[in-house]
Image: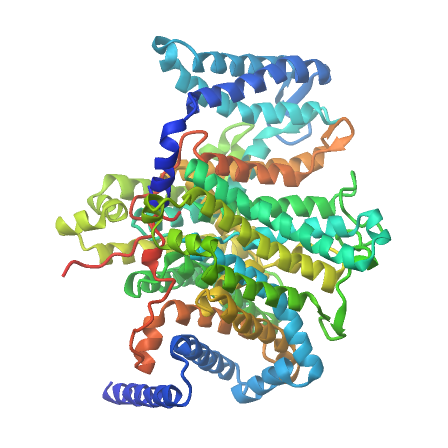
Amino acid sequence: MTTVEHAAGATRASGRIGLDRQSITGLVFGVLGIALLAGVAPAISGTSRRFNFEPPPDPAGIGFHPPTWVIAIGVLFLLTAVLGFAPPEARRWATPARLLSALAVIPLLLVLSLALSDNPSTNIVNLFNESLVLATPLALGATTGLWCERSGIINIGIEGTMLAGAGIGYMTYATIGDAQSTGWLWFSILISVLAGGVVAALLAVLSIRFGVNQIVGGVVINLFALGLTGFLRSEVIVKTGITTGVGTSEFGLPLLSEIPVIGDQLFRGKPIYWMMYLVVIGTWLVMFRTPWGLRVRSCGENPHAAETLGVNVVRIRYQSVILGGLIAGLAGAWFSMESQTRFEDNMTNAAGFIALAALIFGKWTPWGAFGGALLFGFSRALGTRLQFLGVEVSGFEIPSEFLQALPFIVTLVVVAGAVGRSIPPAAAGQPFQRSK
Amino acid sequence: MNGARNANAGIGRAAGQVHRVLTEAWRLQPLYVSLYAILLSFVVGGVLISIIGVNPFTAYWALLRGMVGGGDEIAGSLARSVPFIGSALALAFAFRAGLFNIGAEGQLLAGGITAAYVGALSWMSDLPGIVAIPLILIAGTMGGAIWGGIPGVLRTKTGAHEVISTIMLNSLVLFGVRWMVNSRDPVVLRDTESTVPRTDPISDTAVLPELVDSQPVLHTGLFALVGICFVVAFVLKRTTFGFEVGTVGLNPHASHYAGINVNRVIVASMAASGAFAGLAAASEISGTNGFFQPGTFFLMGFDGIAIALLARTNPVAIIAAALLWGSMLSGAPLMQQEADVSIDVVRIIQAMVLLFVAADAIVRYLFRVREHDQSPFKATSIEGAV
């Protein structure tokens, strides 16, 4: 808690209303449930729809009756609401119910969007896969943020780090490999990763050695990366005359991609996408299951206590920030060598800030951050899909911008503490000075 | 190794000499670090330019002429700088209250779209300019103030840190305005006759009078924003509210026990910050573009952070810092044209300026400047952010 909140808290303490967070969440679900049962279910079309599991022709899938699903989810919401106000002995069911209801929002969105469009079916396995692929840079970026902030350094320069990785990596690929050879492609991805590390090292030096405000340091990085990559693009990449090239190629995981129907869609992918899973799992393992990871976390929570126990706070912070930068560099390579094989100015397009949101949404944990990234990826994939399906509510086409904005609202709500408060590492943002 | 150290010491001695001359020639005490940071950044930029095989002096000469080479260039530079004054004030004012408003980007968009909406209302053309122009400026200011006030309210009511909430609000408003100016069905604010996504042109009566027909047009919005800087300087120095803002910024605890309503000050300073950004956006809409396009304000909020830093959050110094910033951007195209150096060099130089101002220890070390003024952006002043 910062001092301002402290002071604010002191003024508020006396006059609090008797509604706690759980009852507010309950109320929200109650209102939603009633709306679904009374308003939405009777209004939507009763003709049956299909979720397909594979591309045409003749796809496998399940048919369903939209109003039935809406009613089922509405009842679930109402139950959650009732449990929120239930006597204490029944309250232990309230938390799982809330979680289940929150998760049910995703099928609800899918059912509603299909019911409101003229299309009879859509491929949901493919939609799921698209969400995962779009979540790749966000999950990597959120992991970057995780390493930095858990060690006590706020990093709002993830965006710039990614952009530098994307630009410098592609520049290498275009100049040395003519953007054509696989060998140089991997070399260039390595360069991307290293570039990310170097940029993060700059942030580390600024915030650790010089004690610069970490947010200012992040802004420096973002501005610098934008200028540098723009400069390299117009002075080097454009002058090579190469506009596009060969990017990383898809491969299927052995055995898993042989699974009928879903295997080929879910277990085929490009290398950086697969590396994203390794990075997330590796981060969790190292940060929560090794002594070094414990030291990192202790530096983010109470660096002075850590120092007393013999932890070299400065070194740990350098290590974690640079490690985070390497990960952001990989995310950059995803933009310019996997998703597309070219480089454009400001190519990352705020992905670094979205990754930060995913990190906060995930309460500074690896799996939470991954979940947050997936949520953002899903909302983007669904947004594109909705445009494709042409979903209309009484003649009003739902714009993709609305769905894309949704996760930001959710994150804002989470930060504001309405649904399970998100609390940063205690020492994040505070400079550390060695005891003399 | 030894040679390098000697050279280093040599440069250091030369820089120290420069510092002595400046000390004796002008009494610029608090400005040294900023001045040297600018100098150092141009040196770094020059190295970069020579790497690509261009004589840096040729490039900088072209840049300088692009900035102040003639009447039109000077007017263009001034015009380009006007909105930066607002976005830098947005950061500086919040900072005085101990808040880090990195949402100027979003507040500009919110103010801009409000101004464009009000400016294009059908009855605006019936009003005389003397009513219509203040109206459009007030509309933009209000739009920015509301969008800036939200993180303030969230901060006081829920403890959500303003850095996070402003980042989220930036994205939210960006999606919002994109939809408003893109959507054809239904038409929200899009000018359906235009091929590019933008709003309807504002009424002629709401256009700020033009001063010089430069590129971009220099308009009277300049006076509004320069005036606001002096007003803010006065408010911070001479009024109770300004005193409260400064006190809360220094120590919210002590302020609370001294009887200052900390929450009120936080919300009010965030709203005021947003209002400055909104005013800047409105003056751009009214004086320069005549319509709203989301791309207009790209990076302007983040540039504001750099400018506010460069000016050490001093409202009057912001005018000078914004002038430097805007004129560099305005002069860059000539440099590209004549010396064939990418305009992105200017962006790199600007990032370097911010870096050296923020990490003033580097500058102090190089130029042997003693630390007598504490940088307002030292890390200790922001606690537990993000």
Left or right: B370 as drawn, with respect to B235:
left
Q: In this view, does A203 lie above or below B2?
A: above
Which residue occupies the foreground of this view, A97 or B246?
Answer: B246
Q: Is residue B79 above or below residue A207?
A: below
Residue at horizontal 46%, vertical 33%? Answer: A256
Residue at horizontal 31%, vertical 57%? Answer: B380
Q: Can residue A150 be seen in this view?
A: yes
x, y percent for residue B331 = 62, 78
Residue at horizontal 25%, vertical 56%? Answer: A432
Residue A203 placement: quadrant: bottom left
How is the rendered protein coloured?
rainbow
Q: In this view, does A291 lie above or below A112?
A: below
Left or right: B202 as drawn, with respect to A327:
right
x, y percent for residue B287 = 73, 63
Count up the numbered dots.
0
Q: Can residue B299 be seen in this view?
A: no
Residue A400 placement: quadrant: top right
x, y percent for residue A224 = 48, 66
x, y percent for residue B180 = 71, 44
Residue at horizontal 69%, vertical 56%? Answer: B137
Q: In this view, does B196 lie above or below A279?
A: below
Left or right: B13 as drawn, with respect to A156:
left
Quadrant of the snapshot with the N terminus of chain B = bottom left
